[in-house]
Image: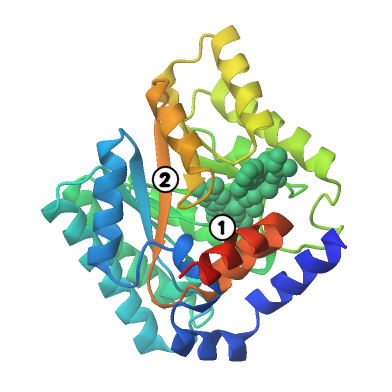
Amino acid sequence: MKNLSRNFFLFLSQNQTLNKSAKRWGWKLGASRVVAGEDINSAMQAVQQLNEDGIMCTVDHLGEFVTDENEALKSAEYCIKTLDAIVSKNVDCNLSLKLTQLGLDIDQKICMYNMENILSAAKKYGIFVRIDMEDFSHYPATIDILKKLRMKYDNTGTVIQAYLHRASADVEALKGIPLRLVKGAYKEPPEVALQKKSDIDNNFIHIIKQHLCNGSYTAIATHDHHIIEKVKKFVQENNIPRDLFEFQMLYGFRVEMHKTLAAEGYRFRTYVPFGKDWYGYFMRRLAERPQNVAFAFKGFFSK
Ligand code: FDA
């Protein structure tokens, strides 16, 4: 049953026709509980509030799988506008983005051009830019682009998904680069990814320890309290300094834990998505946990 609902929502997340109509629907289905708003101002308001609780943020102007060059250029301009807003509002926040939003599916050169413009602006402002990791069909190109960009820009890093068989090898190859480590949100075949939850959890802990022991800055992005407890124990026992890592969670999920971890003195960052193109993001959250469906619809019916 759990797998059925996961597959169903992952299927919906990749359905372009539904995605287009979803843009017209606006705020139905309770997405507004987990998306900070439709424009930069609402995102900045959410960030300011979180900053007041000692929580750092990363904002993501939602969008993916862009197939039109102009749309990709506009996305890049919007990312730069978002960087401007971070600076003008003087908030503790960096930027997350997806390469398919910037033209990866059209032409790698367009994507590189957009990324260079964004990273130049971000570098000028001293802001870090995280390249989110998408499904495996985009994985090799994302790693390749990251490596090229890192030759010129030190203010960027990416995400490694623990469900991938190649996760540990890639963490080793990307030693020294700030990585966000996650379990992985897409449906991937057994040839590419681990399928059993316990195997994914074990590999997640393994790559977290690996990157930390390599002395590389590590963002541990999870809502799983079991994983968080294990990390806390490991860093304490191994004298890993607290400025070498941060915990991250998504906006709207387990919000009390965001505050608690920040109050305990851990570096903590909330991932704040915003924008009209919330559909794919929202469907992946529904796929992750059947309970999220109840959570979202509770929001829908309470409006
Ligand atoms: P998981 O869903 O495995 O849950 C484990 C346990 O934790 C549950 O059984 C429950 O006990 C508890 N739990 C989890 N959520 C809870 C909740 N809401 N309330 C109460 N208990 C809860 N993926 C990707 O492929 N590419 C990316 O770039 C990113 N980026 C990213 C950024 C950030 C900040 C986060 C937090 C996550 C991502 N992800 C991602 C998503 C990630 O890969 C993964 O799909 C989700 O985080 C779900 O896995 P978890 O580790 O959170 O716990």
In the displayed structure, 216 sits above or below 140; it is above
Q: For the C terminus, which image quadrant? A: bottom left
What colouring style does the render use? rainbow
- Residue 293 sits in quarter: bottom right
Within-10-Å neighbours for mark 2: few <14, some 14–19, many 20+: many
Q: Nearer the viewer, mark 2 or mark 1?
A: 2
In the displayed structure, 45 sits above or below 103; it is above
> Mark 1 is on which residue type?
Met
Residue located beneath label 2 in the image:
270
Q: Any atom of ligand 1 within 8 Å of the CB at mark 2?
A: yes
The residue drawn where x is 73% and y is 76% is: 11
Viewer-closest of 212 and 86: 86
Q: Any atom of ligand 1 within 8 Å of the CB at mark 1?
A: yes
Query: Extreme front residue here?
Result: 302
C-alpha span from label 2 to label 1: 17 Å
Viewer-closest of 98 and 109: 98
Classify residue 51 as left or right of residue 156: left
Residue located beneath label 1 in the image:
133
User: Which of the two discs, 2 and 1, labels the residue nearer the N terminus?
Assistant: 1
The residue drawn where x is 54% and y is 71% is: 301
Label 1 near label 2: C-beta < 8 Å?
Answer: no
- Residue 43 sits in quarter: bottom left
Confirm whether residue 51 shows in the render: yes
> Mark 2 is on which residue type?
Thr
Q: For the N terminus, which image quadrant? A: bottom right
In the displayed structure, 236 sits above or below 251; it is above
Q: What element does badge 2 sit on?
A: strand
Residue 236 in picture, x, y percent from top left: 55, 11
Q: What element does badge 1 sit on?
A: loop
Confirm whether residue 80 shows in the render: no
Viewer-closest of 109 and 3: 3
